[in-house]
Amino acid sequence: MPEPADIIVIGAGAAGCVLAERLSSDPSLKVVLIEAGQGKSRPLHAFPMLAGHFYRRAKDNWSFHTEPQPALNGRRLFFPRGKRIGGSTIFNGMVYARGNRGDYDHWAQLGNAGWSYEDVLPYFKRNERHEGGETELHGGSGLVSVSHARPSNPLFYVFIEAVIQAGFPRIADMSSPATAGVGFYDFHIANGRRSSSATVLLEAASSRKNLRIVDCSLVTRILFRGTLAAGVEFVRDGEVSTLLARQEIVLTAGAIGTPHILLLSGIGNPEHLKAVGVAPFRDLPGVGENLTDHLDAWVRVSSRQPVSLLRELRADRIAINVARAQLFGKGPVSESPISAGGYFYSRPGLEYPDLQAFFLPVPATGAKVWYPFTAKAREIRELHGYGLRIGPVRPQSRGRVRLASPNPQEAPRIHPAYLTNAADIAPMIEGLKIARTIFSQPGFEPYRQVETAPGPDVRTDAELEAYVRETADSVFHPVGTARMGNDRMAVVDARLKVHGVGGLRVADASIMPLIPSGNTSAPTMMIAERAADFIREDRRAGRTYADAV
């Protein structure tokens, strides 16, 4: 049996990498980070524009699919989750977005003391190394690099101009606390390279003897001694091993992986556990419940001019652009394909925006940018276009994650229950109307040819709703499946300790009681920063391993 660790961190994603780095900065702590996927990412992962190519690769991905979604015409949606050090930050869109001030104030109002906007802002700043340096809103010396988009494709600037023509405001800083309007996003990009949580972790691991990374190891369950979490069981190369923890175990396996491990360990709804053949250990019916995700839909338009990303990502140019990005950190391959976007109101009277949009200069038909030789040259020219993905950021629909069986290697059953709450339909429809308004502005006149999706024949609300149900897709922001709170359905308390189990915390997107109004990687890293402080504070105060019970 390996030598026990002081703290075991399970899952090397956005949260786990940050948490392991922070904890191991104390040389007196022996930290072990266990990851199911492989170690270092591939060299091409570093190039921002290639994100869309890698998120479907099986070696980097759990490649989940949802259960058939009744409100989406029974479709099973692809549901990627990262399976490598860095987690989903190795192939996500890299958007640095915090959400809205009201998101975190609402968390606090739900009984989670210490999680208001003013409480969490210092942790966002601590994690951030913004190219503009330290300001009232931004951190300048944190772990993860953040830079402002300066896209080279002209359509991004046309989009901003058209949005202003449509009467929407321009935002200089998309991290401002009450964001409404459009602008260029900030990104986890440094010198034209992806700045993922893996970068943070691997730099620390190379110089710290007290930090050990155990990759290619699937955690199958948490081991208990009485009411305490005492260790973990994991499988590596077909062999079952155990690792004990002297102080704590922290789950950072994400909104799908964390409830999966908790349920396999007997923590969850006893009725569900018994039904799939798992012996109940702790009755926490909220485990796997409250799954919330962002859903959006496209408006696409074909372009009269060859100005979409196809121009630079053609196979005869991609090698040059990769070399340019590699040598100089410049050019289209070093940029995000979703550099511009913003936040909108679906109706008057809302306290803060409820829609988020991403503008992309991509093929008008939805054909893959990455494989241009799958069409003839003439057909490729006809694909040039642009589009807007838009959808509600505070959906009311709630789903769940359940075990399919007691076999840890069998994927869990993921049911996001998209659009099952009727309140989510109207914002989706209004978002499509906003996109059409923007694309009808004079700024797009030199480019606008014909709307290819939903298409000119789709006009009424009923027709738009049918289009949404047929085509809407996940934005891949699952949260909430081990939510923080003090009610019967809560899984962790405000210090992220699992209710009724000593020595066990959760510190990832699954603890979010409500989904943030934006992308989720930055809020997830903020949670990891908070968890590191909670653990340090408890150690300094002499709180014991069993104090969570």
Image (cartoon, helix red, strand yellow):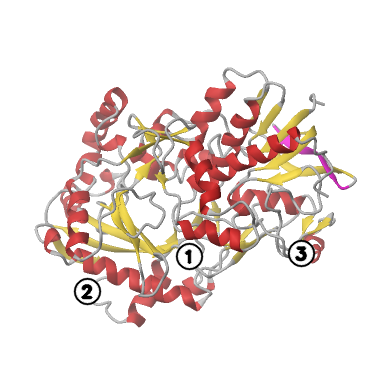
From the image, tell me which residue sits under label 1: 394
Q: In the rendered structure, which disc, 1 or 2, sits on the residue that comes first in sequence?
A: 1
Task: Report crowding for label 1: few under 14, some 14 to 19, many 20 or more residues within 10 A (C-alpha).
Answer: many
Gap between marks 1 and 2 measured at Cα: 29 Å
Kind of residue at disc 1: Arg
- The answer to whether residue 514 of the structure is visible from this angle is no
Q: For the point 17% across and 56% down, which residue is it? A: 161
Name the spot of residue 152 as percent of width and height, x first: 21, 40
Instruction: Name the amino acid type tagged 2.
Output: Pro
Q: Is residue 481 left or right of residue 442?
A: right
Identify which residue is drawn at 42% across, 49% down.
Answer: 97
Where residue 272 is drawn, which disc sits there?
3
Q: Give the overall secondary structure of the magenta segment.
A: strand
Q: Residue at x 58, y 50 (%)?
A: 509
Q: Residues in magenta?
A: 227-236
Is residue 85 part of the magenta span, yes or no?
A: no
Residue 490 in the image: state x and y as whole percent.
70, 60
The percent coordinates of residue 243 (x first, y second) are 78, 32
The residue indicated by pointer 2 is 456
Q: Residue at x 59, y 23 (%)?
A: 205
Name the kind of residue labelled 3 in the image.
His
Q: Is residue 28 left or right of residue 145?
A: right
Circle 2: element type: loop
Q: Are marks 3 and 2 in contact (CB under 8 Å)?
A: no
Instruction: Mark 2: give few (<14), some (14-19) or many (20+) Cα within 10 Å.
Output: few
**Picture disc at residue 406:** none
Q: CA distance from mark 1 to mark 3?
A: 28 Å
Assign a secondary structure to mark 1: loop
Q: CA distance from mark 3 to mark 2?
A: 47 Å
Q: Earlier in the sequence, mark 1 or mark 3?
A: 3
Classify 303 as above or below 29.
below
Residue 129 placement (x, y as % from top left): 43, 33
